Amino acid sequence: MPSLATLSVDLNALAHNFHALEAIARVPVHPVVKADAYGLGAIPVARRLMAEGARTFFVARASGGFALREALGPEPVIHVLDGCVGDGAPALIAAGLSPILNHGDQLAAWRAAGGGACGLQIDTGMNRLGFRPEEAPEPFPGLGLVMSHLACADTPDTPMNRQQRDAFATAVQRYPGVVRSFANSGGVFLGPDFGFDAVRPGISLYGSGPEGRPDARLKAVATFMAEVLQVRDVPVGESVGYSQGFRAETPRRIAVCAAGYADGVLRSTSPWGAVWLGGALRSIVGRVSMDVIAVDVTGTDVAVGDRAELFGANRSLDEAATAAGTIAYELLTSVTPRVPRVYSG
Ligand SMILES: *Cc1c(COP(=O)(O)O)cnc(C)c1O
């Protein structure tokens, strides 16, 4: 039985975005496929990106790295952003994963276990992960990549972007010949001097544009659809949904669609949310429930079995995120396992 709600993943659009980012950055693209490729499925996503030429990937957790190594075979480099955690070094070595070492204890643990190929993160001001520049270690055998991460890449006018870039440029002078990686998606769009030797985009591969706005150079990769379960007429004065979240001031026709917060439709989507249904954007009315939303389809012939697009080519991921008071990253990673991922391309 086909599912009432689906997350379709267009791998051709993913390939398009990969090459678009290559063309903008003019250096190799090392895709970030952490959190199961932002919920889209790390294995099919990384397989396709490999077919398009990607040879280096980033995951956050070691667990994501083990799964990816198993699926992709021995060839690609897989960096683990968490680094070498606890007594995890032997398992990383056995799987041929490259930890991004973030502090002295991680470096010591990696060396004690015999080490090997790894990367180093320099914190240039975000105060998240990585060595402070003044505490960064001397170059050592196995070190293949040195990276840092922007705190404000989606706000191009922030002076911190250039401060971080310059701090990174200074810090990497210590590591001649080591691959330098600085820019995430937002950083790719900040200009060529942010690119260094390789860029590390995630969200823009999956269709979100710079500054959290749709961009004509990128295609929608993920389409979240939900089928209409019931269409009803609501007379004047009656309400729709929990807590009477919507009241009909004129007669309304309401389509109840099969996706709710248990599928990843954030409850904060009401009252600004909209879906693409019956050839136009239509408002989500009342509260998002666990399994359904109500959509105002007054004046249309929308019927049971029609499909509403929560985000995709017609209702952009970025606009849907803004309407929910969040960012594309959270929207994508919120789509729950109940929603099957369907691949094309
Ligand atoms: C998540 C992440 C990225 C990718 O960021 P996007 O904004 O999705 O492109 C790159 N580098 C690091 C360190 C990250 O944590």
Image (spheres, rainbow, N blue to C red):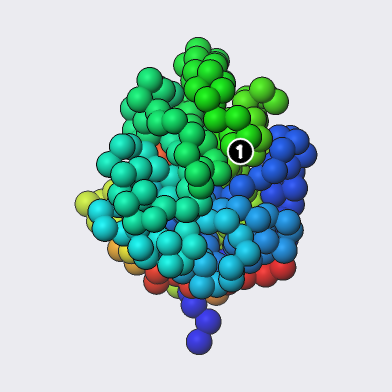
Q: Is residue 215 above or below residue 43?
A: above
Tell me the quarter of the image containing the C terminus.
bottom right
User: Residue 279 placed where, x, y %?
Assistant: 66, 56
Q: Would you place residue 154 above or below residue 292 in this image?
A: above
Asked which secondary structure carries label 1, the reply is strand
Q: What's the residue at 49%, 77% (across, down)?
A: 3
Report the side of 51 relative to 287 (left or right).
Answer: right
Q: Position of residue 44 (x, y in %)?
A: 59, 68
Between 43 and 300, the one nearer to me in the picture: 43
Q: Is residue 335 above or below residue 73?
A: above
- Taking the spot 63% from the left edge, 34% from the top edge, the residue there is 177
Q: Determine the image quadrant of residue 8.
A: bottom right
**Horizontal placement of 208 versus 339: left or right?**
right
How far across and how far down the image is residue 86, in percent?
25, 54
Q: Residues within 10 Å of mark 1 (few under 14, many from 20)?
A: some
Asked if one can make out residue 126 in the rendered structure from this viewpoint, the answer is: no
Q: Residue at x 40, y 61 (%)?
A: 92
- Asked whether the viewer can see residue 30, the reply is yes
Across and down, in percent, residue 185 comes to: 58, 37
Q: Name the image quarter holding residue 259.
A: bottom left
Nearer to the camera, 61 or 286: 61
> What is the three-letter code of the residue carrying label 1?
Val
Residue annotated with mark 1: 179
Q: Residue at image x 52%, y 25%?
A: 174
Horizontal placement of 224 versus 64: left or right? right
